[in-house]
């Protein structure tokens, strides 16, 4: 199992502990079970006899037999399998059993069984997203944060702390609504109704087209006003062992000043820290009604920007407290949003594979089981929402990758079945063996490379590119 990490992790540091181990065990166990359950149920549906259902490969750890099927938990939890009668060439099949043998089924039935695994992974991801939208997701308030000088927002007179109530008469509930309105603006002047300290004002703002890098480092044009959502300089999380942690900074601390410079937004603080790596900085913070000063020296870190260039910045190891609210969606809306999100992540995964082949995305962004284990713990530490979102994304990765027409993957089996349906007879055993070996070699090579990336991250301690 391997993933492209660019749209999942961003700039992420990972660690390993018991929470990480248990989180990874749950992640692998659930996703493997869902995938193999798809094969299992559709094999049962079309009348194929199932000999074994295993979570994991290799030596048996636990197992029981129910009816004609043996259910196993095996030693290596990086996959699983459903063994069906007639799936391989071992032994003769009794005449009365041929009607229930996999290799005696018509091509369309075998295709259904093969397709069911990755399809179940996609459906499972959609189900997770539906539950997430029903439970509620955090959305940023439509409060204006950092404003770029000479930007449309600056020229229009918008100020940090303004809450956007309406745009062109349409109610604004979150900053996502602001982004959507800008995307649809086509550059026309828009009337913003804002609340400024209890006073309602109307401000005309004319978006301008800006160029920005997408997650693949490609330039794209967007309509922008030069304002970001408001994040107060309040600490939401302190990374264990970081410079901030060692200096005594705590969750909930409000940072009032850095080097005597008053702060309004989180970006005001980061703009100072990023440019002061290795230099001691004085932080004035407010904690439980008291004010105190701490000295923190930002750690020098090299990060890779969306365009691929590397940049050296200072980091102290903190994350902001969100300025957001929980929005819960109705069942019909959650169903639609869950399916849409699954589609979006699936497309992003396919595009990412293409970009890897085109070498637009560096190969170092490929991650293997070690990275997935680490990231499972990282996401679990951020809460159930982060963990289950991560599970949905990995489930989509697993589903999409298994659709690839590579022998030994489900997509390879579908390719062979399609050729068989056109030729009206299966490929020769020799051709199948050569193709299977080539596919297995490709998968093993990719897995070795993914493991290499994982190990190098462990050795060097570098962030994910």
Image: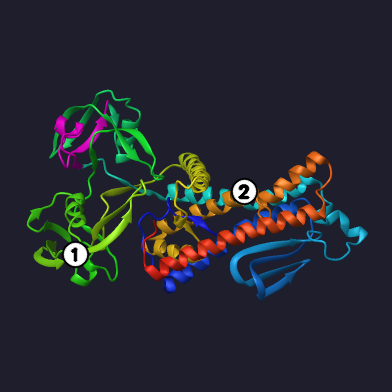
Q: Which image quadrant: the C terminus?
A: bottom left
Label whose residue precedes the other's in the sequence (2 or 1) = 1
Is the Cβ of the residue at disc 2 closer than 8 Å to that at disc 1? no
The residue shown at (74%, 56%) is: 434
SS at circle 1: loop
The residue shown at (70%, 55%) is: 41
- According to the picture, the residue beneath numbered tag 2 turns out to be 404
CA neighbours of label 1 inside 10 A, class few (<14), some (14 to 19), many (20+)? some
Q: Depth check: give the residue in front, 78 or 131.
A: 78
SS at circle 2: loop
CA neighbours of label 2 inside 10 A, class few (<14), some (14 to 19), many (20+)? some
Q: Position of residue 18 (x, y in %)?
A: 43, 74
Q: Depth check: give the residue in front, 406 or 58.
A: 406
Drawn side of residue 152 relative to residue 333, left or right: left
Q: Position of residue 277 (x, y in %)?
A: 20, 61
- According to the picture, the residue beneath numbered tag 1 turns out to be 278
């Amino acid at each position: 199992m391997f993933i492209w990490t660019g749209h999942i992790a961003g700039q992420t540091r990972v660690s390993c502990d018991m929470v990480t181990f248990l989180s990874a065990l749950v992640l692998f166990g659930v996703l493997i079970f869902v995938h193999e359950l798809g094969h299992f149920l559709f094999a049962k549906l079309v009348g194929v006899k199932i000999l074994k259902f295993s979570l994991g490969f290799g030596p048996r750890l636990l197992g029981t037999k129910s009816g004609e099927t043996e259910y196993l938990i095996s030693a290596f939890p990086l996959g699983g399998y459903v063994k069906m009668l007639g799936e391989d060439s071992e032994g003769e099949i009794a005449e009365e059993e041929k009607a229930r043998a996999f290799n005696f089924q018509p091509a369309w039935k075998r295709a259904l069984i093969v397709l069911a695994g990755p399809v179940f992974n996609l459906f499972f991801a959609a189900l997770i997203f539906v539950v997430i939208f029903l439970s509620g997701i955090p959305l940023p308030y439509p409060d204006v944060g950092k404003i770029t000088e000479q930007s449309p927002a600056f020229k229009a007179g918008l100020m940090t702390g303004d809450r956007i109530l309406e745009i062109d008469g349409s109610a604004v509930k979150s900053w996502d609504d602001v982004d959507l309105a800008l995307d649809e603006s086509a550059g026309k002047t828009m009337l913003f109704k804002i609340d400024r300290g209890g006073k309602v004002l109307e401000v005309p703002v004319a978006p301008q087209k800006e160029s920005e890098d997408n997650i693949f480092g490609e330039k794209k044009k967007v309509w922008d006003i030069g304002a970001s959502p408001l994040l107060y300089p309040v600490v939401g999380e302190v990374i264990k062992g970081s410079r901030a942690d060692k200096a005594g900074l705590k969750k909930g601390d409000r940072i009032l000043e850095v080097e005597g410079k008053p702060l309004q937004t989180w970006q005001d603080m980061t703009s100072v820290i990023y440019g002061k790596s290795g230099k001691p900085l004085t932080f004035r913070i407010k904690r439980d009604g008291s004010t105190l000063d701490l000295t923190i020296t930002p750690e020098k870190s090299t990060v890779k920007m969306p365009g691929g260039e590397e940049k050296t910045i200072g980091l102290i190891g903190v994350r902001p407290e969100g300025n957001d609210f929980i929005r819960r969606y109705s069942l019909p809306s959650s169903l639609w949003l869950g399916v849409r999100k699954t589609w979006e992540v699936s497309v992003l995964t396919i595009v990412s594979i293409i970009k890897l082949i085109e070498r637009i995305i560096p190969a170092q962004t490929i991650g293997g089981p070690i990275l997935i284990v680490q990231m499972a713990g990282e996401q679990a530490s951020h809460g159930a929402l982060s963990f289950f979102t991560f599970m949905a994304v990995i489930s989509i990765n697993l589903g999409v990758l298994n659709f690839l027409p590579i022998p030994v993957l489900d997509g390879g089996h579908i390719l062979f079945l399609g050729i068989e349906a056109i030729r009206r007879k299966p490929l020769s055993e020799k051709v199948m063996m050569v193709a299977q070996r080539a596919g297995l070699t490709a998968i093993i090579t990719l897995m070795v490379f993914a493991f290499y990336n994982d190990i190098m991250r462990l050795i060097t301690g570098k962030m994910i590119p």
